[in-house]
Image (cartoon, coloured by chain):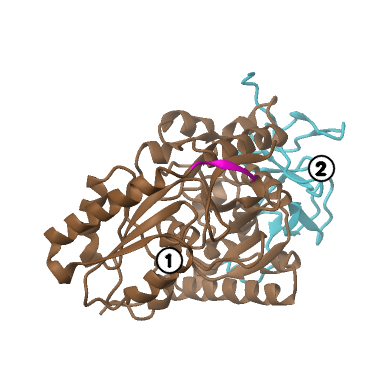
């Protein structure tokens, strides 16, 4: 039965968790937000390094904060602002309220940080009590939006973990769900291949545009040979061409048609496989996936990466069994088993789809058990002032 | 669960190469899912590619069901396939200099 037990939200989304978000509007408000969250079980701090000083990212960062506050996994939000920051809290409060979620605003400059913390704790406690009345109900797997990430890849990532995730991605799309491929630097060299899978001409054009921009950015950052992104280490590991390396990453998205290309932290209008225009850097990629509404993220790794996200469960898939054993406290699934004669892709699909539905229904991933949430690393691309 | 390892991994039916799980020495016989048996024509390092079919010069090399490049010389079934006989279609690849 392809269902999970989730929290119904008034905006039609379904949460796999029931968090109270303590959302910092600006870095200067981080400490107060963290103190509030630390004092209230059930509250999760979402702190980041921005909210002021960077004008170019203002719209993207505001959209991300809205997405984190109005997230399926979040019952209600306490937004902590300073009072003079560049990011205006009003549209964030309005959008979260419009999603049907309770939202409380605490402005530090009104009262000072001590009183702000106390007010925030009281507000968070009240929200946690209200959230506790929510109960999980059965929903089809198609209500899930699954982010697809790879980090710390090794020679086997494209052989085991990523193809296994691709099989899961195709399965979820068949159920009516949404999966999200991102990390545009990993798509360089595959434009014509992905373009052929685009649902329509507009999607094809957007794929070309966003990959070209990622390529241009790589050249600016790394110099004219950036396009030859296969390092000697990659070649020793078996990669012969940039297309092969990129296809190994793209494989996480399976073979489904690509329905839409969205901006960082932008909610898709289509279901199915979509692409989010975002960086290859995992710490900045995850907030984009969370901000667009992914309830769960699945993350392949060959060298081992414990990174999680405060309000979104991150499932870790090891490309090789030695890693799964060495970092067993951080790894959920071992794709290295695919190297064994008695375990194939249909076995991986059965295991991963069941695990996905269990996580959706409340089972904690290793990253959640280890409280690997950490700082929300909002994507940046401009110089600071 | 047995710990015996596969010889190769094939991702898609369209693929004309497969990846060696462990090093395949020249002469090693490899059973394919379609019932054929092929023989490694050279030493294939772990995680490197072995040709599942003959790939004439200029033809596409398929992995993940998509072309990853073309054969720069005639490739025979069982050959090690890598930068010495496979090149990228995309002219973005620059062959001189080091990358990061």
A37 or A332: which is nearer to us?
A37
Colour in which chain B is drawn: cyan
Residue A373: x, y in percent?
36, 48
10 Å crowding of disc 1: few (<14), some (14-19), many (20+): many
- Kindly report the secondary structure that dominates the magenta region of the rendered protein: strand
A92 vs A288, left or right, is left
Residue A373 visible in this rendered orientation of the protein: no
Q: Which residue is mark 1?
A: A96
**Magenta-colored span:** A135-140
Q: Which residue is mark 2?
A: B77
Which quadrant of the structure image shows residue A23?
bottom left
A361 vs A201, left or right, is left
Which quadrant of the structure image shows residue A211?
bottom right
Q: Chain of mark 2?
A: B
| Figure chain in brown | A
A21 vs A149, left or right, is left
Residue A233: x, y in percent?
50, 50
Say what secondary structure mark 1 lies in: helix
Q: Chain of mark 1?
A: A
A180 vs A328, left or right, is right
Q: Judge whether residue A41 is colored magenta.
A: no
* Residue at horizontal 58 percent and vertical 35 percent from the top: A355
10 Å crowding of disc 2: few (<14), some (14-19), many (20+): some
User: Is disc 1 in the same subunit as disc 2?
Assistant: no
Residue B76: x, y in percent?
81, 46
Figure check: A253 above or below B38: below
């Amino acid at each position: 039965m392809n269902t999970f037990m989730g929290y119904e939200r008034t905006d039609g989304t379904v949460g796999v968790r029931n968090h109270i978000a303590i959302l910092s509007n600006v870095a200067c408000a981080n400490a107060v937000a963290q103190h509030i969250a630390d004092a209230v079980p059930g509250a999760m701090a979402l702190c980041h390094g921005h909210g002021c000083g960077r004008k170019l990212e203002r719209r993207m960062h505001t959209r991300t904060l809205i997405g984190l506050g109005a997230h399926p996994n979040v019952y209600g939000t306490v937004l902590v602002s300073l009072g003079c920051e560049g990011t205006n809290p009003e549209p964030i409060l309005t959008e979260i309220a419009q999603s049907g979620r309770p939202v409380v605003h605490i402005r530090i400059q009104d009262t000072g940080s001590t009183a702000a913390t106390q007010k925030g704790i009281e507000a968070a406690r009240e929200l946690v009590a209200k959230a506790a009345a929510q109960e999980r109900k059965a929903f089809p797997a198609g209500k899930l939006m699954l982010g697809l990430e790879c980090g710390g890849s090794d020679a086997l990532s494209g052989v085991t973990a990523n193809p296994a995730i691709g099989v899961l991605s195709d399965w979820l799309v068949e159920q009516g769900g949404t999966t999200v491929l991102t990390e545009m630097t990993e798509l360089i060299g595959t434009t014509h291949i992905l373009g052929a899978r685009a649902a329509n001409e507009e999607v094809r054009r957007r794929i070309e545009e966003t990959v070209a921009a990622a390529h241009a950015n790589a050249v600016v950052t790394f110099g004219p040979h950036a396009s030859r992104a296969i390092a000697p280490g990659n070649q020793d590991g078996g990669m012969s061409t940039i297309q092969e390396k990129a296809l190994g990453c793209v494989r996480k998205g399976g073979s489904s048609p690509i329905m839409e290309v969205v901006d960082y932290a932008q909610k898709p209008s289509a279901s199915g496989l979509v692409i989010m225009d975002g960086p290859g850097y995992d710490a900045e990629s995850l907030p984009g996936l969370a901000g667009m509404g992914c309830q769960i993220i699945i993350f392949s790794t060959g060298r081992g990466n414990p990174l999680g996200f405060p309000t979104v469960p991150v499932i870790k898939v090891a490309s090789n069994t030695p890693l799964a054993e060495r970092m067993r406290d951080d790894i959920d699934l071992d794709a290295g088993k695919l190297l064994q004669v008695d375990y194939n892709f249909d076995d991986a699909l059965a295991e991963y789809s069941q695990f996905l539905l269990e996580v959706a229904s409340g089972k904690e991933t290793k990253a959640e058990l280890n409280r690997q949430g950490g700082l929300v690393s909002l994507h940046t691309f401009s110089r600071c002032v | 669960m047995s710990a015996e390892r596969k010889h190769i991994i094939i991702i898609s039916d369209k693929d004309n190469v497969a990846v060696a799980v462990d090093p395949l020495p020249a002469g090693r016989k490899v059973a394919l899912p379609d019932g054929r048996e092929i023989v490694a024509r050279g030493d294939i390092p772990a995680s490197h590619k072995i040709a599942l079919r003959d790939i004439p010069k200029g033809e596409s090399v398929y992995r993940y069901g998509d072309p990853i490049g073309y054969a720069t010389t005639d490739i025979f079934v069982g050959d090690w396939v890598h930068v010495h006989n496979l090149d990228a279609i995309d002219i973005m690849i620059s062959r001189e200099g080091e990358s990061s």
